[in-house]
């Protein structure tokens, strides 16, 4: 019979806190994105729906691939820590870029955040 490994409660809470942070990030995007794309960026609801559908289909393909890559990663820092470190800045940049729109009346190459910042 195989040995069972008991995961301490402190470790479970640690993993849960990381998952809560990740879900807070994604849920805040999901709750605001549809309204942002339709009301601020001026896309039709149909276009936004198709965009989300295509992105989810892409996720269905790429998530298992990334899972295989991360499972096969072996470094002195562990299996998943390098992925967290390597993707932190791109995630932050993408989160910001999702809400950048063209400002009417400015040059074609300029862009700004959809809502003005207080500074």
Image (cartoon, helix red, strand yellow):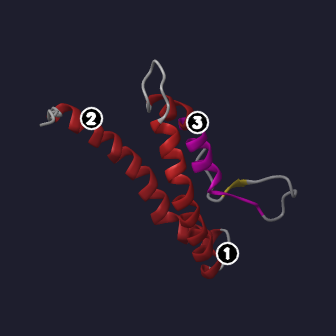
* Residue 107 in picture, x, y percent from top left: 87, 56
| Residue mark closest to the camera, 3 vs 1 | 3
Q: Secondary structure at mark 1?
A: loop
Q: Earlier in the sequence, mark 3 or mark 1?
A: 1
Given residues 30 and 109, the one toward you in this image is: 30
**Image disc number at residue 43:** 1
- Secondary structure beneath dot 3 equals helix
Q: Quadrant of the N terminus?
A: top left
Quadrant placement of the C terminus: top right
Count of residue discs = 3
Q: Going 53% across and 36% down the picture, which residue do you hit?
A: 88
Residue that label 3 marks: 89
The magenta-colored residue range is 88-103
Question: Does residue 30 show up magenta in the picture?
Answer: no
The residue at which mark 2 appears reads as 14
Q: Residue at x 26, y 35 (%)?
A: 14
Residue 46 located left or right of residue 27: right
Q: Position of residue 18 (x, y in %)?
A: 34, 40
Q: Residue at x 38, y 52 (%)?
A: 23
> In this image, 97 relative to 77: left or right?
right
Circle 3 Cα neighbour tier, 10 Å, few/some/many (<14 / 14–19 / ≥20): few
Secondary structure of the residue carrying tag 2 is: helix
């Amino acid at each position: 019979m195989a040995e069972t490994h008991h995961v301490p409660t402190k470790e479970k809470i640690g993993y849960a806190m990381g998952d809560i942070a990740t879900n807070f990030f994604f849920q805040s995007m999901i709750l605001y994105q549809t309204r942002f794309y339709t009301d601020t960026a001026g896309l039709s609801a149909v276009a936004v729906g198709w965009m989300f559908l295509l992105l989810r289909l892409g996720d269905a393909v790429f998530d298992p691939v990334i899972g295989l890559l991360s499972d096969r990663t072996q470094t002195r820092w562990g299996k998943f820590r390098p992925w967290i470190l390597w993707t932190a800045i791109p995630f932050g940049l993408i989160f910001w870029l999702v809400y950048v729109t063209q400002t009417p009346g400015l040059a074609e190459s300029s862009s700004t955040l959809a809502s003005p910042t207080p500074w």
